[in-house]
Amino acid sequence: MDPRFRGDDKSKAHCTNNQSFKLSCSSMKTHGFNLIELLIVMAMIAILVSLAYPSYQSCLRNARRTGAEVELVRLSERMSEYYSQYGTYLGASIPAFGVDNSKQYQFKITELDAQDYLIIAAPLNSQTADACGNLSINEIGRRGARQKGCW
């Protein structure tokens, strides 16, 4: 077997001592990675991350919106309970129902009178990039958003 193709130390010594094998021995690769290979891998990872991150952000916005929708329905149910107990919507408030305005949505009751209300969930911070905008629900369960298909 040709010593150039063996992986032992004797073949390396043979390559350095024998001038006839100088070209073929210099092309023998050592173990490990060189800087160019690492930079190429890092560039590929950066490209993959730059493609995946917007999709990840979109999934987060959708999940937060779903949480706000659930909270709006829960608030609407609490408003119905309040109306059943007092015969009016007047006096109802978000803090009375134990809703904690999150970092992503602010909940508020607007257009409040004895027979009607409108609860709005306004997006905050990074959630403002969501195309759906404000989410709302009224006393008859009619849901609203900036775009169709958000609810």
Image (spheres, grey):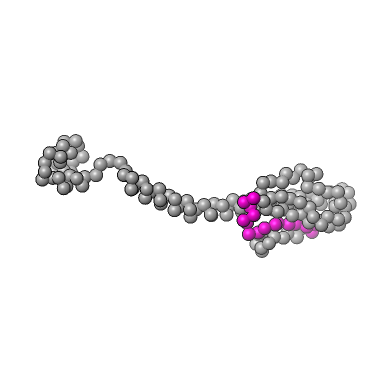
| Residue 67, visible in the rendered structure | no
Q: Residue furthest bottom?
A: 148
Residue at the image position 81 percent from the left and 48 percent from the top: 93
Q: Is residue 40 left or right of residue 57?
A: left
Residue at the image position 21 percent from the left and 39 percent from the top: 7
Q: Nearer the viewer, residue 102 or 85?
A: 102
| Residue 17, visible in the rendered structure | yes
Start-end of magenta stretch: 125-140
Query: Which quarter of the rendered picture does the C terminus lie within?
Result: bottom right
The image shows a total of numbered marks equal to 0
Instruction: Residue 121 in the image: state x and y as whole percent.
Output: 72, 53
Query: Which quarter of the rendered picture does the N terminus lie within?
Result: top left
Residue 131 location, quadrant: bottom right
Figure check: 12 above or below 117: above
Q: Is residue 58 left or right of residue 7?
A: right
Q: Is residue 129 left or right of residue 100?
A: left
Q: Nearer the viewer, residue 73 or 25?
A: 25
Residue at the image position 86 percent from the left and 51 percent from the top: 90
Query: Does the segment drawn in magenta span residue 48?
Result: no
Instruction: Residue 111 in the image: state x and y as whole percent.
Output: 81, 57
Instruction: Residue 53 in the image: state x and y as whole percent.
Output: 52, 52
Q: Residue furthest right?
A: 87
Query: Does the segment drawn in magenta span residue 128?
Result: yes
Q: Nearer the viewer, residue 47 or 81?
A: 47
Instruction: Residue 133 in the image: state x and y as whole percent.
Output: 67, 58
